[in-house]
């Protein structure tokens, strides 16, 4: 466990890293300090080849209420240059989470408002409780979901993003699943057991193959074909077939045994 003030980074022997938002008394609302610590933690995880996947969670009743009120009040008194610096840090956080080499899984309970929706959208997979509440609430206080907007559009689609960013409507876990923001939703009391099942399933997979797959899918994007993309996909499958884990996985399949990573 690493020493942070606003977050916790917990490593398990199986190669699972859990990153906790840890300001439950503030509903895990984030401020400049939390953003800086999240950036530090994600850089640590990104540099650690032993991490098989990252779980992003929030301590207490809520995943995150979005931006901290005191931080927003302080930001309102800053000039444009200082606000741009703050925005750059938030952008760095979102980009690091989105580009993290290992798979990421967000687990959402309670509120996920404003920038917290961006954190969820940046993760590869997200699950949540059926009664979780989501809102792109920025326009209610005269702001816009600017830095998180590219990730939200990728997760929700352009049309739904316009609706919820312009209306600031709240929507629950079931609606989030319909929109694609959540992969699945569960009754609140079943969220931890569902997470255990997701964890067990991810642990069946080759750590190296998941990293290669994630990097490939970033390159594939919307799937628009090009000669360069075709060459990239061909080189990926050729390379992974001859990799150590590729050879182990194929051998285990043919030998009808469990691969070494299991």
Image: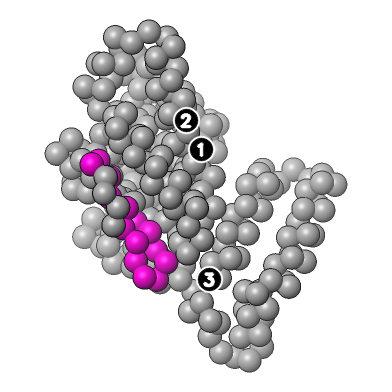
Where is mark 2, residue-wise?
91
Q: Quadrant of residue 244?
A: bottom right
Contact between marks 1 and 2 (CB within 8 A): the answer is yes
In magenta, the rendered stretch is 5-18
- Disc 1 designates what residue? 95
Badge 3 element: loop
Q: Nearer the viewer, residue 252 or 117?
A: 252
Q: Nearer the viewer, mark 2 or mark 3?
A: 2
Q: CA distance from mark 2 to mark 3?
A: 31 Å
Give x and y (percent) for residue 25.
Answer: 14, 39
Contact (Cβ within 8 Å) of mark 2 with mark 3? no
- In the figure, residue 253 lies in which quadrant? bottom right
Q: Residues within 10 Å of mark 2 (few under 14, many from 20)?
A: some
Q: Secondary structure at mark 2?
A: helix
Report the disc number at residue 205: 3
Q: Tell which circle, 2 or 3, labels the residue nearer the N-terminal end.
A: 2
């Amino acid at each position: 466990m690493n020493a942070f003030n606003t977050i916790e980074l917990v490593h398990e022997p199986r190669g699972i890293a859990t990153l906790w938002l840890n300001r439950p008394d503030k509903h895990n609302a984030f401020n400049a300090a939390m953003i800086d610590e999240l950036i530090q933690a994600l850089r640590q995880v990104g540099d650690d080849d032993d991490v098989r996947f990252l779980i992003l969670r929030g301590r207490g009743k809520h995943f995150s209420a979005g931006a901290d009120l005191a931080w927003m009040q302080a930001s309102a008194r800053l000039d444009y240059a200082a606000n741009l610096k703050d925005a750059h840090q938030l952008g760095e956080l979102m980009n690091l989470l989105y580009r993290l080499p290992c798979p990421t899984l967000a687990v959402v309970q309670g509120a996920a408002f404003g920038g917290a929706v961006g954190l969820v959208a940046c993760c590869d997979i997200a699950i949540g409780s059926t009664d979780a509440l989501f809102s792109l609430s920025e326009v209610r206080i005269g702001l816009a979901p600017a830095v998180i907007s590219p990730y939200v559009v990728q997760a929700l689609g352009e049309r739904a993003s316009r609706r919820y960013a312009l209306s600031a409507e709240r929507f629950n876990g079931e609606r989030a699943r319909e929109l694609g923001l959540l992969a699945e939703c569960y009754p609140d009391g079943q969220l931890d057991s569902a997470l255990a099942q997701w964890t067990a399933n991810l642990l069946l997979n080759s750590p190296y193959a998941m990293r290669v797959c994630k990097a490939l899918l970033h390159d594939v994007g919307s799937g628009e074909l090009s000669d360069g993309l075709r060459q990239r996909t061909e080189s990926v499958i050729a390379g992974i077939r001859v990799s150590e884990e590729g050879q182990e996985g194929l051998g285990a399949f043919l030998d009808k045994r469990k691969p070494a990573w299991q």
